[in-house]
Image (tube, rainbow, N blue to C red):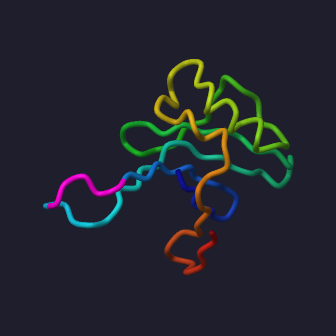
Amino acid sequence: MECDAGPGYLTIVECRPPWRKDLGPEWTRFPIARLRYTSTTRRWALHWRDRHLRFHRYDQLPASPHAGDLLQETGRHPIAIFAGLAVTAQRPRAIRQPASTGARFR
């Protein structure tokens, strides 16, 4: 797991090693969930990703001032919307800025 950081959001990304030689040596990165921060309310909201790679507000949990509360929900995934993301309640392996900013955090 990795986490991409952008202005006002964190995107949790599943990373998988190369699995077919014909696809090259690059790892596969797939966005799973997003935490959006609203500065006026000072709260984080959890969003889920649909099959078209669009994010939607997860309405099973209210926004929280603590991102960790929302990460725990992704690990629980009570309605299976975050299936495959059971490790997200743990610290992500890396936090990265989107490629356009050029900054990268590890």
Specify whether residue 20 is painted magenta: yes
Q: Nearer the viewer, residue 14 or 11?
A: 14
45 relative to 22, above or below = above
Identify the residue at horizontal 49%, vertical 43% (top origin).
32
Magenta stretch secondary structure, dominant: loop
Q: Residue furthest bottom?
A: 102
Specify whether residue 29 is painted magenta: no
Identify the residue at horizontal 62%, vertical 52% (top origin).
92
What is the quadrant of the C terminus in the image?
bottom right
Q: Nearer the viewer, residue 91 or 51?
A: 91
14 relative to 5, above or below = above
Residue range corresponding to the magenta coloring = 17-21
3 relative to 101, above or below = above
Where does the image place residue 11, in percent across and percent down from the top left?
57, 52
Where does the image place residue 38, in percent across and percent down from the top left?
77, 51
Tag count: 0
Where does the image place residue 84, in percent across and percent down from the top left?
46, 33
Please tell me in which quadrant of the rendered image residue 28 appears. bottom left
Q: Nearer the viewer, residue 17 or 9?
A: 17
Please tell me in which quadrant of the rendered image residue 78 appears. top right
